[in-house]
Amino acid sequence: MAFVEIEGLSKRYGSFGITEISLSVERGTTMTLMGPSGSGKTSLLRNIAGFDLPDAGHIYIGGREVTHEPAGRRGVGMVFQELALFPKMTVYDNIAYGLRARRITEAEIKLEVKSLAESLKIGELLGRYPFEISSGERQRAAIARSAIVSPDLLLLDEPFSSVDSQLRIALRSELKSFARKNALTMIFVTHDHHEGLFMADSVSIIFDGAAVRSGTPEDVFIHPKSPRIARFLGYNVIEYHGKNVAVHPRDISIGRDGELSVRILSSGFEGEFTRFVAETERGENITILVDGLTETSAEGTEQRIAIERFEELEDE
């Protein structure tokens, strides 16, 4: 049995619900739950945490069934999308909050808080209040507060949604390094597939309350299986030689020798690459990414393209 086992978990919320979800997370690894907004990722997380109780199925953490255990007895920490720091407490007191419920001396608490804060690069901010620090620093403090009690499992619900894109990249890199160094077992929720793939040792894609694709990040990305999964992961989905296929925007080249004709709808330079949006002869809209600065094309011009790699898809 894996360290975290979810077996056939179902929960109805009126007309919506999660349905017979089964997942496994090994100790010391991170599973990412990815999917569009409203797909059921947070609902699943709430059932694992114990904030909601499932209608059917089983949850095991560390070999112990916790399906109907109260949240406080599951050994689970959670970092919410909305940061839940106490505004009238300093960063130090926010992080120390969970330790003070245990029989630990203040000297031991101080040592643990300082060590963890320094590892998350907020050691110099312990005397400040949440409103006195940046959003990224508040996010680090929230992670520290959840991690300091050494939970068996740490759940993170889109923890970087409130910060800008450059800071998100830095924070997710820091969190991944921190998790590896401390052998944390985590389930990380995001609707951003780039972020999800980067963070994950394993991935599960959630659509409409069901787990539709699970595996390693490399396998899930390279072999998306279905048109809907492919589109979520940023692929073009087109008919090619009579088959429904996924083609990544970087696996299409523009040139005179291309076998397909497309009409350019728009194009523009985005720094790392030039983006073309085009329409095939079958009326399918596709995106093409060409590395670096290249000549853009006027709207309505015809171009030839070649597909360098594709993945055949199953029918939905």
Image (tube, helix red, strand yellow):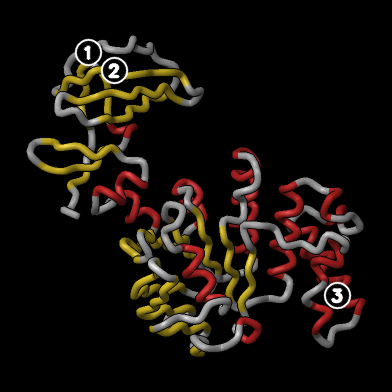
Name the image quarter holding the N terminus.
bottom left
Rendered position, 89 above or below 60: above
Horizontal side of residue 125 vs 313, given as left or right: right
Cα–Cα span, label 3 and label 1: 67 Å
Please tell me which of labels 3 and 2 falls first in the chain.
3
Cα–Cα span, label 3 and label 2: 62 Å
Horizontal side of residue 39 vs 305, given as left or right: right
- Tell me the residue at 22%/13% (across/down): 302
Cα–Cα span, label 1 and label 2: 6 Å
Name the residue carrying label 1. Answer: 302
Please tell me which of labels 1 and 2 falls first in the chain.
2
Q: Position of residue 153 (x, y in %)?
A: 58, 74
Q: Position of residue 170 (x, y in %)?
A: 64, 45
Labels 3 and 2 touching (C-beta < 8 A): no
Please tell me which of labels 3 and 1 falls first in the chain.
3
Q: Which mark is residue 264?
A: 2
- Tell me the residue at 23%/15% (across/down): 303
Rendered position, 140 above or below 69: above
Determine the image quadrant of residue 17: bottom left
